[in-house]
Image (cartoon, rainbow, N blue to C red):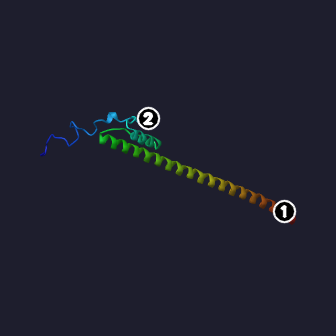
């Protein structure tokens, strides 16, 4: 391959593209294939409990792609749960701060009222 060569890198534009067979991958909401062997069905049930998709395939690339997709979904779900917990903690902290400020304001108002009463009593005793 010299400079200006028209050949493409391996796998890109060639007949044996790694993207081949992607149409066979089930969508997120699609029902996965039921495996024919009993041990495969057990594996399918176990994976389904974990929310994963198992497809019987001789195409290793497709299997790896599905596993990667499942892992990415798990990470995204975990990240969303983390973000939700973080937001909930922030909301609770803000609520606590608002309650503290409301309490402090109430105490200041009571102190101001008490001070006014004491001031009036002092003025009345002077007169």
In depth, the one of 101 and 47 nearer the eye is 47
Q: Residue furthest front?
A: 38
In depth, the one of 121 and 29 nearer the eye is 29
Q: Residue at x 35, y 36 (%)?
A: 25
Q: Residue furthest left?
A: 2
How far is disc 2 from disc 1 in space, using C-alphas? 77 Å
Percent coordinates x, y for residue 125 in the rendering: 87, 65
The total number of labels drawn is: 2
Residue placed under numbered mark 2 in the picture = 29
Percent coordinates x, y for residue 16 in the rendering: 22, 38
In depth, the one of 56 and 10 nearer the eye is 56
Percent coordinates x, y for residue 69 in the rendering: 38, 43
Label placed on residue 121: 1
Q: Residue at x 36, y 41 (%)?
A: 66
Image quadrant where one finds the N terminus = top left
**In the rendered view, does 95 fall on the left or right side of 4?**
right
Quarter location, residue 19: top left
**In the rendered view, does 110 fall on the left or right side of 84?**
right
Which-is-in-front pick, marks 2 and 1? 2
Q: Residue at x 32, y 36 (%)?
A: 22
Label placed on residue 38: none
Q: Residue at x 33, y 33 (%)?
A: 23
Secondary element under disc 2, as helix, strand or loop, is loop
Q: Earlier in the sequence, mark 2 or mark 1?
A: 2
Secondary element under disc 1, as helix, strand or loop, is helix
Q: From the viewer's perspective, is residue 71 above or below residue 25?
A: below
């Amino acid at each position: 391959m010299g400079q200006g060569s028209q050949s493409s890198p391996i796998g890109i534009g060639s007949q044996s593209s790694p993207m081949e067979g992607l149409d066979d991958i089930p969508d997120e909401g699609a029902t996965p294939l039921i495996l024919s062997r009993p041990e495969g069905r057990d594996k399918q049930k176990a994976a389904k409990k974990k929310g994963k998709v198992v497809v019987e395939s001789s195409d290793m690339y497709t299997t790896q792609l599905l596993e990667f997709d499942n892992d990415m979904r798990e990470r995204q779900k975990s990240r969303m749960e983390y973000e939700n917990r973080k937001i909930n903690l922030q909301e609770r902290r803000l609520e606590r701060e608002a309650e503290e400020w409301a309490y402090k304001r109430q105490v200041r108002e009571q102190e101001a009222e008490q001070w006014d009463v004491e001031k009036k009593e002092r003025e009345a005793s002077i007169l």
